[in-house]
Image (cartoon, rainbow, N blue to C red):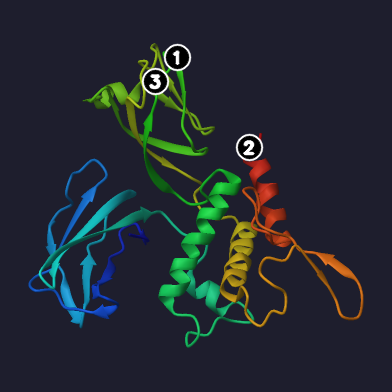
Amino acid sequence: MSLVRVLRTASAVLAHTFEVDEVLTDADGAVTVDVKRLDGTPIAGSPFTASHDATGTYSLALPGQAQLDALTADWAATIAGATVAMRDVVEIVGGFLFGLREARIRPPGLPAAKYSTTTLAERRIEVENDAELICRTAFVPRYKRYALSGNDQRLLLTPHADLRTLRSVRVDGTDWSPDQVAEVRVRESGVLELIGGRWPYGARNVIVEVEHGLDYSPAPITTAAITHLRSLLSSGANSAVPENALSWSAGEGGTYRISTPAKDRVGIPAVDGIYFRWGQDLGGFA
């Protein structure tokens, strides 16, 4: 399984390789890709037939999607007589912490011969996930579908701050009408307030679709994220310090403590200082 992030309205190419004992192998017939929303609704045109690009390599040109969303892409093929199924998750997002070209050309540069576009995109997802986890908010518009537990109270807390829009509500298997959804006040703090009622009690019985996050990534966050990206790309390269070291003694004397990652930091002081400050400003830290 892989995670791919695609800008809203932009088309994207999804790719998969099939192997038998590490050898790229063509499918016995057509490779299909079934693309659905998280509620199981297929997108227009699904299922698709993938294109055969090279031995064992197939791709799908995913049409642009108008809304923020999260999709599953299920690849199905018969390889060497065996049925093979693989799944990708495709997030349709309203922006990124930084553009790939922006990260590549910022001095001293990330040459394409050494760092492919695919590598940068994969590492950017890792950087974005860390920033959101630490600051407890998204810095660009995002979509989420949550299964929440009703608490018989007027207020229901979601996992993310900076809520933008409540798109749908399903309670105990029943979809709410647009008028009912409109009776829910969306608070930026991440709370859904049911005006004139209480959220029915139950375990994961309230399914909500929301949009959350800021309009765009603030400049300090973008700078910190690119710094983090560069650190991930160069991790362990030409370093005499063991990866599991907590301190380091220089040959000319002196011992230095090494900053290490944890649940609330990535281990780079210049990055962690910015994330901590913005996390506090956005109310992400208790």
Residues under numbered marks 3 and 2 in contact, where contact means CB atoms less than 8 Å apart: no
Q: Residue at x 72, y 74 (%)?
A: 241
Nearest the eye: 222 or 50: 50
* Residue annotated with mark 2: 283
| In-front residue for pair 249/95 | 249
Mark 2 belongs to which amino acid? Gly
The answer to whether residue 209 shows anywhere in this view is yes
Disc on the earlier residue, 3 or 2: 3
Q: CA distance from mark 3 to mark 1?
A: 8 Å
Q: Is residue 134 above or below residue 251?
A: above
Q: Which mark is residue 150?
A: 3
Identify the element where label 2 is drawn.
loop
Give x and y (percent) for residue 163: 47, 37
Q: Quadrant of residue 116?
A: bottom left
Give amino acid for label 1. Gln
Q: Position of residue 89 (x, y in %)?
A: 32, 55
Tell me the kind of residue under disc 3: Gly
Mark 3 neighbour density, 10 Å: few (under 14) some (14–19) many (20 or more): many
Q: Which residue is mark 1?
A: 153
Q: Secondary structure at mark 3?
A: loop
**Residue at 16% across, 69% down:** 50
Q: CA distance from mark 2 to mark 1?
A: 23 Å
* Residues at discs 3 and 1 in contact (Cβ within 8 Å): no
Q: Residue furthest right?
A: 253
